[in-house]
Structures are given as C-alpha cells and as structure tokens.
Image: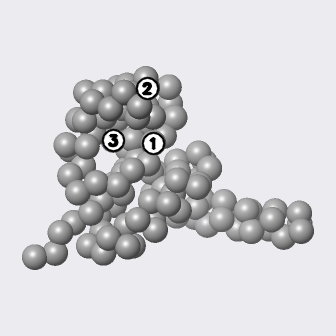
C-alpha cells in the first residue's frame, strides 16, 4: 500500500504562512492549534488555518517540494494557495531575471 504524504501551508493569526509536511493534514493542523510544541513557529501565532495542501506518494518528492516552498516569498506562496499558475510563473521569471542582473 502506498502511503500519502502531504505538504501543507497554514496561515497563522499574524497573517504569516507556515509550510510543513505530514501524513495526516487534519491531525497536524489540530496539533498546531493545540500548541503541543512550545518551540514551534506556530505556537505563539495560533490559531492557524489550513490554506493549501498537496498530496504525494513519493517521500523524496514531498520533502523536495516542502523545501522549495519554504524558500519562496509570501507572494509566491499566496499564488500557490490561490492556484494562480500564471502569477507563479511571473514570480519565478522575475526572480530568474533579477538574479541574472545582479551577477
């Protein structure tokens, strides 16, 4: 049996985003809201609201995607949440263009 792994984004009470990985989205969001881990980013930013999740069956792909999204700007994460693929492409192209100018 192939086990599902999810990359998720929650929006915190301070309007920041937190990206994580789990095998149970509902339980993980509940855990964030319960404040089980006092050292967690979300602990002082509760409550959190689930804004996005994507299912994977390959753990390596899920981990790679989580790392990628964690490195994204807020605008890019918002575009992903809104499923605005064109905006995601624009933001990716802008970053590539800007980094080539700075070299």
Establish if 88 lies above or below 77.
Answer: below
90 to the left or right of 39: right
Identify the residue under disc 2: 45
Q: Say which label, 3 or 2, has the lower sequence index.
A: 2
Q: CA distance from mark 2 to mark 1?
A: 10 Å
Q: Nearer the viewer, residue 76 or 37?
A: 37
Establish if 6 lies above or below 16.
Answer: below
Image quadrant in which you'd find residue 51: top left
Does residue 33 show up?
Answer: no
The x and y percentages for residue 101 are 89, 66
Identify the residue under disc 3: 50
The x and y percentages for residue 50 are 33, 41
Does residue 89 show up?
Answer: yes
- Pointer 1 local density, CA inside 10 Å: few below 14, some 14–19, many at least 20: some
**The C terminus lies in quadrant:** bottom right
Identify the residue under disc 1: 18
Q: Say which label, 2 or 1, has the lower sequence index.
A: 1
SS under mark 2: helix
Q: Nearer the viewer, residue 72 or 38?
A: 38
**The N terminus lies in quadrant:** bottom left
Q: Residue at x 74, y 68 (%)?
A: 96
Q: Nearer the viewer, mark 3 or mark 2?
A: 2
Q: Which mark is residue 94?
A: none
- Whether tag 3 and tag 2 are in contact, CB under 8 A, the answer is no
SS under mark 1: strand
Q: Residue at x 43, y 23 (%)?
A: 44
Q: Say which label, 1 or 3, has the lower sequence index.
A: 1
């Amino acid at each position: 049996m192939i086990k599902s792994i999810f990359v998720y984004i929650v929006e915190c009470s301070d309007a920041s985003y937190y990206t994580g990985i789990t095998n149970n989205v509902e339980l993980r969001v509940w855990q964030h809201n319960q404040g089980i881990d006092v050292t967690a980013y979300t602990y002082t930013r509760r409550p959190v609201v689930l804004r996005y999740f994507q299912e994977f069956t390959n753990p390596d792909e899920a981990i790679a995607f989580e790392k990628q999204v964690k490195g994204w700007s807020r605008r890019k994460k918002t575009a992903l949440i809104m499923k605005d693929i064109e905006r995601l492409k624009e933001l990716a192209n802008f970053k590539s263009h800007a980094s080539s100018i700075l070299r």
